[in-house]
């Protein structure tokens, strides 16, 4: 199983980025998917989650109204559209595939830096 994030980078406050997480080696549509982030010196935080079918999602209060999680089961890809970025959004962003029990997988992360 491999999850590969991409799309991170340096952006100014108020800007936008779209993260992608390409999945392989698993039946993607059978997994709920999460985006987490970890800022320097802080614990990992759940940012957004989406159901297997993509018909329901939840968000951390800190990103509601600014971030949108989505998925394309035909392309085995998870997305995170991030708008109106703030310096406090600076972190490494990870995708996670969640099955049942101990059946879950993590990507290696992609760095997002919001700075002027």
Image (tube, helix red, strand yellow):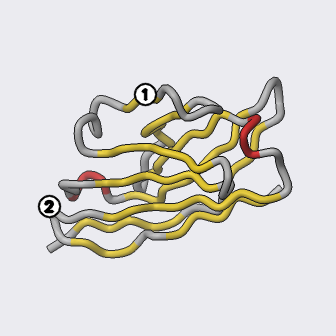
Q: Is residue 101 left or right of residue 70?
A: right
Instruction: Tell me if residue 10 comes above or below residue 96 in the rendering.
Output: below
Is 34 located above or below residue 59 in the figure? Answer: below
Residue furthest out toward the front: 74
Residue 105 numbered tag: none
Residue 2, located in which quarter of the rendered image? bottom right
* Residue for badge 1: 58
Residue highlighted by disc 2: 14
Determine the residue positioned at 38% across, 74% down.
9
Give the Cα distance between marks 1 and 2.
Answer: 22 Å
Percent x, y of residue 39: 40, 53
- Quarter occupied by residue 40: bottom left
Residue 103 horizontal side relative to residue 58, left or right: right
Query: Which image quarter holds the N terminus?
Result: bottom right
Q: From the viewer's perspective, is 94 left or right of 17?
A: right
Q: Secondary structure at mark 1?
A: strand
């Amino acid at each position: 199983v491999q999850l590969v994030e991409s799309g991170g980078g340096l952006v100014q406050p108020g800007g936008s980025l779209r993260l992608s997480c390409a999945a392989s080696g698993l039946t993607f549509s059978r997994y709920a998917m999460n985006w987490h982030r970890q800022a320097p010196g802080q614990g990992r935080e759940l940012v957004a989650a989406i159901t297997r079918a993509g018909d329901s999602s939840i968000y951390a209060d800190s990103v509601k109204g600014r971030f949108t999680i989505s998925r394309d089961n035909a392309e085995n890809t998870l997305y995170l559209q991030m708008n109106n970025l703030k310096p406090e959004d600076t972190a490494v962003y990870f995708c996670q595939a969640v099955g049942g029990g101990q059946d879950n997988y993590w990507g290696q992360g992609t760095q997002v830096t919001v700075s002027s």
